[in-house]
Amino acid sequence: MRDNVFLRDISTAMLLETMAEGVMMIDTSGKIRVWNKAMTEMTGYQASEAVGRSTEWLRAPECVGARQIFSLLDPKEKKNCVTGCECRIIARSGEHIPVMVNARILRGDNDETIGILQTVTDFRPVFSLRQEIVAMAEKLQSEENFHGITGKSTAMQKVFRMISLAAESDATVMILGESGTGKELVATAIQRLSNRSSGPFIRVNCGALPESLLESELFGHEKGSFTGAVKQRIGRFEAADGGTIFLDEIGDISPAMQVKLLRVLQLGEFERVGGEKTVKVNVRVITATNKEMLKEVREGRFREDLFYRLRVFPIALPPLRQRPEDIPLLARHFVSRFGATTGKLITGLSREAMSRLVSYVWPGNVRELENAIEYSFVVCQEKTIGAEDLPGEIFAAATHQINSFTTATTPTRPQSESKATFPVMERMTARKILRSGELLQKILDDNLWNKAEVGRILGVSRTAVWKWIEKHGLIKSQ
């Protein structure tokens, strides 16, 4: 307590020490000056170890919300407090503890800033509850979530029916679709619903291994069969006996491997590399590819007899651009998932952000959408993901033309001014307008500096408008 020099009297000190919430005060240089008992209980560090140190020592790398707190020290921000800021702090044990921080500026007798007072709430119970809720939600099956696959479109409902039918037999399944459409999820769902669900489920990415290694991976090898084969090793087919093997990127295997795979499908047997003993297995085969297999067959790169052996029951997955009605559902699903795993209190996406997601073509399909939401979680400083939080390529590609200024701005603007200014703006994206201080000033003036309205017109958040105002140093016209 001797180090807590900012405490004026013993009654204040006693109050801080009995609080259930952590209390920490930093001075204008970012050094800790007050540290109460609850902070010690939360982190394992005593006040004597914390006082005088920079908060950088305490803050975990994923704590992006700290910028909001330190913005209180910027006189241009003209803010007195920050509430509900999520952060992570590093305990003595090394654990990254999720916390909720409320901060308020402290001013002296002459109104000079002397520091920031923060209350720190341990968010681990809420974080654990979030994860439990998400886990429970993922177990619930509905028309929108079929064994881990999300979709409500007609195309996906058809896929769900095909999965159910495939699971009722042992027929060989070929899953066709572009990269990122969820082919492995479909294979997993078939296995879980089948009568082989209690057996092994072995996954092999055929495109990731050269032919020499792929043969050993699939069929195993005997000791001494090649350099480095110091002991016998069973292959993936042998490991999958009684269950299911999923061969992803099947279209990439060599002609020699195609012959060996055909034998397994026809006879259910093979020899390990360097071995003579025939190994018999009972394995269901599911394959997947993003190639046009009929074209591969026609051009001689894939055996026709093997193709039809593998394609007994084909399931075609539609690309995401062909089922735009599923994009909001998927986006909310990923927001929920990353909210649980990161502990950030992001509750959804703004209308404009969602609009841009829906209008984007998604060459990387669902995987690209998942990565986009994860990126947004890293950069978003609000409780709602805005359009400006989306990855640059999505923001740029999905930016619609600004063509409604005349109806969106104030009706008092002179008609001649509208004709002179807005035809130029109609050919520009929102991002280009924001980057132009002159054009942004014009829109602000026309809308009486209503930043929320300007944000609505440009399809960005009020915070984004404020940031660009600060960046350009704009001031309200007299």
Image (cartoon, grey):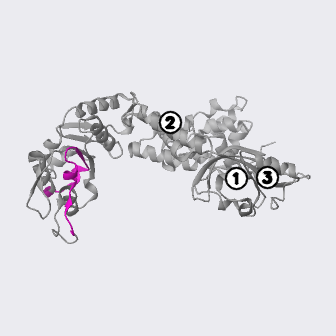
Q: Percent from the top left, x then y, of residue 231?
A: 21, 67
2 or 1: mark nearer the eye: 1
| Residue placed under numbered mark 3 in the picture | 75
Q: Is residue 285 left or right of residue 410?
A: left
**Which of pointers 2 and 3 lies earlier in the amino acid sequence?**
3
| Residue placed under numbered mark 2 in the picture | 133
Q: Is residue 94 left or right of residue 177?
A: right
Residue positioned most to the right: 110
Label 2 amino acid?
Ile
Residue occupying the point 77% across, 52% down: 116
The CA span between labels 3 and 1 is: 29 Å
**Where does the magenta region start and end?**
229-256
Q: Contact, CB < 8 Å: mark 2 with mark 3?
A: no
Label 1 amino acid?
Met
Label 3 secondary element: loop
Label at residue 39: 1
Q: Is residue 416 left or right of residue 331?
A: right
Q: Nearer the viewer, residue 286 or 21?
A: 21
Residue occupying the point 86% across, 48% down: 11
